[in-house]
Image (spheres, rainbow, N blue to C red):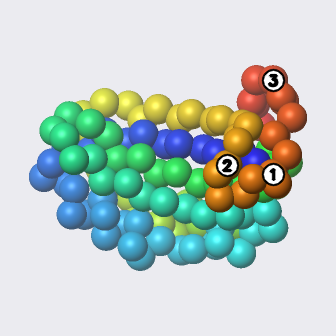
Amino acid sequence: MITVANRLYVKPEYADQFETVFRERAGLVDKMPGFISNLVLRPVNEGQPYVVLTTWDSRQDLMNWIRSEAFTEGHAKSGTLPKDAYFQQNELELNEVIQDSARPELAPEPHGGPFKMH
């Protein structure tokens, strides 16, 4: 299993619009093989980022999504905010899951080394 955390530093005056974009997202990722979940987390402290956290069965499932036409289509259909809606560039983190308490039988994701988007 692998997770992707996209940390997005949204200015407070754009918070409602940002949240609307995710509530009205295309949802194409939800139909991809290996997709587990998509969480959008709102920061509780000022200056912290929103976190968009997706979980995948495997690194290969994530790569299949990134390389799919649905990825391009989904991102094109999603609403976007102007560049000045962000006070800092987003940060993308990928993590291999080595343990999940909700799935104790889960084998750790094999160490795959650095991740290349393309």
Label 1 to label 3: alpha-carbon separation: 20 Å
Q: As drawn, is 100 to the left or to the right of 34?
A: left
**Identity, as a three-letter code, of the amino acid under mark 1:** Leu
The residue mark sitting in front, 3 or 2, is 2
Q: Which residue is mark 2?
A: 100
Q: Position of residue 45 (x, y in %)?
A: 19, 40
Q: Residue at x 22, y 47 (%)?
A: 44
Q: Residue at x 84, y 30 (%)?
A: 112
Q: As drawn, is 77 to the left or to the right of 23?
A: right
Q: Position of residue 4 (x, y in %)?
A: 60, 44
Q: Which residue is mark 1?
A: 106
**Identity, as a three-letter code, of the amino acid under mark 2:** Asp
Q: Quadrant of residue 74?
A: bottom right
Labelled pair 1, 2 in contact (Cβ < 8 Å): yes
- Whichever of callouts 3 and 2 sits on the residue coming sooner in the sequence is 2
Q: Which residue is mark 3?
A: 113
Q: The residue tagged with tag 2: helix, strand or loop?
A: loop
Q: Position of residue 82 (x, y in %)?
A: 29, 50
**Identity, as a three-letter code, of the amino acid under mark 3:** Gly
The crowding category of the residue bearing disc 3, from other C-alpha atoms within 10 Å (few below 14, some 14 to 19, many at least 20), is few
Q: Is residue 85 above or below residue 80?
A: above
